[in-house]
Image: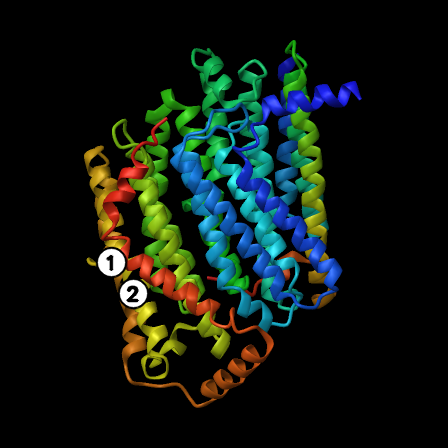
Amino acid sequence: IIDYELILSTYLVCVGFFGLITSRNMVRALMSLELILNGIILNFIIFSNFFTNREGGEIFSLFIITLAAVEAATGLAISLSIHRIRKCTRIDQLNLLKW
Amino acid sequence: MNDINSFLSRLNSTINFSTILPEIILIVGLITIVITDLVNKGKNAIFLYKIFLVSTLVSMGILFYQLISVIAFEDLYTNNIFNNLFRFFILICSFISVLLSVDYVLCSKISLAEFPLFKISAGLGGMILSCATDLITIYVSLEFLALSSCFLSGYTKRDIRSNEASMKFLLMSGASSSSLLYGFSLLYGFSDGQVQLDNIIDKILFSQYLPTICISAAFILAGTAFKLSLFPFHQWTPDVYEGSPTPVVAFFSVTSKVAALSLFTRLFRLIFPYLSNEWHIVVELLAISSMILGNLIAVTQRSFKRMLAYSSISQIGYVMIGILAADLENGYASMLTYTFIYIFMNLGTFARITLFSLRTGTDNIRDYAGLYMKDPVLTFSLVLCLLSLGGIPPLSGFFGKLYLFWHGWKAGLYISVTVALVTSVISIYYYLKIIKLMLTKTTNPVDTLKTYEKQKSLVSSVISTKLKSSVEMAMILCALASTLSGLFMDPIIKITRNTFF
């Protein structure tokens, strides 16, 4: 049964990556980043279920949840500052820096 | 009360406070900066910078003292020469990069107080990353460094290019550190629930799940190669370097690369020693392609910062040879020596770019024409640093590269060293192109001179006399270090030799 669970978490990570790559909106990209991190948290919890001392994976998951929140806060701060200048948060229109 | 006593006694036995004393001093400096800024309500902001510099210097002094005497090992935090040297490098980077950023931040009229805050937190993240032996500590400190750098790169809020650079940096660093984390989760699972790196090696050494360990190695490689900007993961580097404010680029071009080097070395040398054939081949491929790509594209660049971004990609390619060539008697001496010299060369070049862009506001290479007539000190020190980056004989870059390539040849990496030599020669071309442009007689129109006078008066009226020439101080320090380190190469090599683990 562990392989089904691992496949589920890998599927979440893949969906998150797809969302991150193909999103035109900054907020949607941040949501996909959160999804990737949540898939990885699920991976840790699945593994920690099978060991006698469960502390390692579960404590690590708490840290990852916190860091995911921090990254989301950072991303929202940056998208707010982009929004103030450009009045929209589309990230495919940011093409000033090339080659 | 009883619980607090037992908790404190357990805390004292697990964390030996003298080992993390440099970080504690930096944290105290951070809190002092926040409180001082709140109390002063935004006036007298130079005092914050002085606090930063003092705390960095004290921390460096303590670390230097610890380097001389050996302190006991701990669980989360081992102290050996490798870790301490990297912490020392990161402290040097923070110190010099704050010296060269004071004028820039003052002149661009943005909020002044958060800048040393973010720099201290990024320096702290880098220092903890250099000593971390635990998956959790590695991930948290890596994210600490990355997110502080992200805030720093978006510091000039009104400039759209800075916002774009910071957004790109955040999204790509989030994606890559989640890839690293996925590799960590596989390692955690297949080593029976161990989180400390030493325990993980014991458990996965004779495991039967070898393909999964290889997959986790691939994910970890993807995650760390992003921070190092090796070949397929280098796409963020030129955009972020061009968009961010120049002193910030100086800071995280050295700090995050140095911290990522220590992370990369520790992870790959400790966890995957028996896979060393596989990851040697992959890292060699990455190093060769980043050297070729970095140097070839740098030839075509018109913006100085972008050109330096591509050249730093190729410098990391050279350092990868040093990692691959580590053996028992010499440790990581070649990599550490070249990293030390690279810090000074890179920071010196960025100091001069900062000074130049303060005076003229431009970043194009063509605008450097005829600089010799207007400011010979700037020109001469820039010539020294660029030649050192290129690897011309009496300067220290040459000695660093010589040692690196000699080690690589001795370790059998013939293809890598040949490619490195050829691309080194190509890099001399684009450095000399700038030097020739500076030393020839064609001058710019008169507008730039007017901008120079206006900036100079603004600067000297706002800041105190002690820090008026802090950029020049940083410039001269780096120029001296990048010329004279070559002569003092032997003691440096002797110190860095004892670092194999």
Q: Please say if A67 is above or below B482.
A: above
- Quadrant of residue B369 within the rendered picture: bottom left
Q: Mark 1 points at which residue?
A: B395
In the image, what residue type sits under mark 1? Leu
In the image, what residue type sits under mark 2? Leu
* Residue occupying the far right of the picture: B1
Q: Mark 2 lies on which chain?
A: B
Question: Within 10 Å of the Cα at label 1, are there few (<14), some (14-19), or many (20+) other Cα atoms?
Answer: many
Query: Can you give x and y, in whole percent of width and height, for residue B217 in the image?
Result: 46, 28
Which secondary structure, mark 2?
helix
| Picture quarter with the C terminus of chain B | top left
Q: Mark 1 lies on which chain?
A: B
Whole-angstrom CA distance, mark 2 to mark 1, is 8 Å
Is residue B229 in view from this perspective? no
Residue at 43% in and 11% down? B206
- Quadrant of residue B329 within the rendered picture: top left
- Please indicate whether residue B17 sits to the left or right of residue B374 in the image: right
Is residue B53 in view from this perspective? yes
Residue at 26% in and 41% down? B416
Query: Can you give x and y, in whole percent of width and height, for residue B200 in the image?
Result: 50, 18
- Please indicate whether residue B216 sits to the left or right of residue B69 in the image: right
Residue B312 vs residue B340, the one in the foreground: B340
Residue at 45% in and 87% down? B449
Q: Name the residue under label 2.
A: B384
Would you say the residues marked 2 and 1 are in contact, meaning their CB atoms lie under 8 Å apart? yes
